[in-house]
Image (cartoon, rainbow, N blue to C red):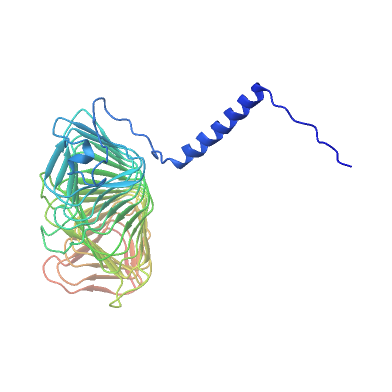
Amino acid sequence: MNTRRPMVTWSSTSLRLMSALFLGALLAIVALAIPRPATAATCPSGAVQWTGSGDGTSWGDASNWGGSLPGASDDVCIEPISPAVITHSAGTTSVLSITTNGNASIQVSGGYLEATSTSQTSALGADLSMPSSGTIGFANDVTVSGDVSITGGASGDLLVGGVTTINGTLLMQPTSVSGGIGSFDGTFAGAGTVILNGALDWNGGVFSQIDVTANGATTMATTGWKELDAGAVLNLNGPTTWSGGPLRLGVNWMGGSGATINNNTTWTITHDNFTTVNLGYTRTINNNGTIDIDIATTTDGVRSGYIDATINNNNTLLLSNVDTLTFNGDGTWTTTVDIPTGTTLDLGSVHTWTATSNLTGAGSLSTTWNTTFDGAFDFTGDITSTNGTVAINAPALVTVSSLSMPSSGTIGFANDVTVSGDVSITGGASGDLLVGGVTTIN
């Protein structure tokens, strides 16, 4: 027996509702398939728009700009709907400002691209790179949401005149960083300031004139020379490691002179035979955090470091793993420094230890110029003065292992001193031991 199924009838309202639902679902699927900008850009009114209708990548292809290249009186806006690298490869190009979305990375592989406006800011939503010999300049403020890399050869530079904010990583690693004066490639320069919120990988190249604040982790690696010059300031606010290559401070190429590093973090130096190079201009390291000399391995059997800069030690210096550390510039010391057994602290210029300071430990202190201790002096190791005067003005008894004046150095004690070992005065003129209290030599 066949049972007939009831016939289903649809009202016109139901049919319209089903059609609407089907059309909505279809439109949603199509929308998902269409690429959309990763991050919208806020472009200046009237900006010349990138169309990408040419090869889709070349700045110098007029078809990518709707048929006419932007000029010196134009703001430009680049908003591709899918990721693209916009490449400037030759010639000198001037525009007022550059604004991109999160899909548009700018690569300057050759020539000079500059944003000249001093009133309109630039904003790059993705990455900025100088992979070879290209230079880019911004006269006013610029924000880079992605990474910045300076990895090319001669003239691969970034020049800034306002506040530059980089939210990604800054990689400084030019291909040519030989040690000769003037031979540096890869320069980040200008009279502006840089706020770096990502990491700084400083493997070579030059910071010139600018004031850089590194809020992320900083790494100074590879054998490449690293230069800070022409009045540049580097503020280290994130954990910092120096593991390779010399650091050159204070040369004057672009006006102004000197260089300053403000350490506000933990700066660990693991680089054997590390050196900062003095080029005759003011160079200063202000240690407001911790500098930890921790050289785990050595190539010549001696773990050593040489800093030819003024040191203002306002916080912690740790001599964790070093045989000899030399400060060849002047210094001011306001806190406690410990010299462990087996370590020599070599002070090569005028150094002042204030009333709040203290020298401790049982290692070796060596001086080649005037050094004054006005604070506590709980150091019990060996003291050698080869030139100038070491004046120890500690108010209490000082006990040391030995005293040595092998040439023209003088060591003076304002109060009582006990020497548990030998005293050697073997130099010429001015090779003296001056005492103001009871001196006991055992």
Of residues 60 and 425, which is closer to you in this image? 60
Between 388 and 235, the one nearer to me in the picture:
235
Answer left or right for 135 relative to 292.
left
Q: How many marks?
A: 0
As drawn, 69 above or below 365: above
| Residue 266 x, y percent position in the rendering | 38, 53
Q: Quadrant of residue 166?
A: top left
The spot of residue 384 in percent (x, y) is 24, 68
- The picture quadrant where one finds residue 190 is top left
> Residue at the spot x=14%, y=45% of the render?
112
Identity of the residue furthest to the bottom in this view: 301
Residue found at the far front of this picture? 1
Q: Which percent across, then down, holds residue 1?
A: 89, 42
Residue 101, given in percent of the width and then of the height, sits at 33, 38
155 vs 322, left or right, is: left
Quarter in which the C terminus is drawn: bottom left
Which residue is depicted at the point 11% across and 50% down?
252
Q: Quadrant of residue 104?
A: top left
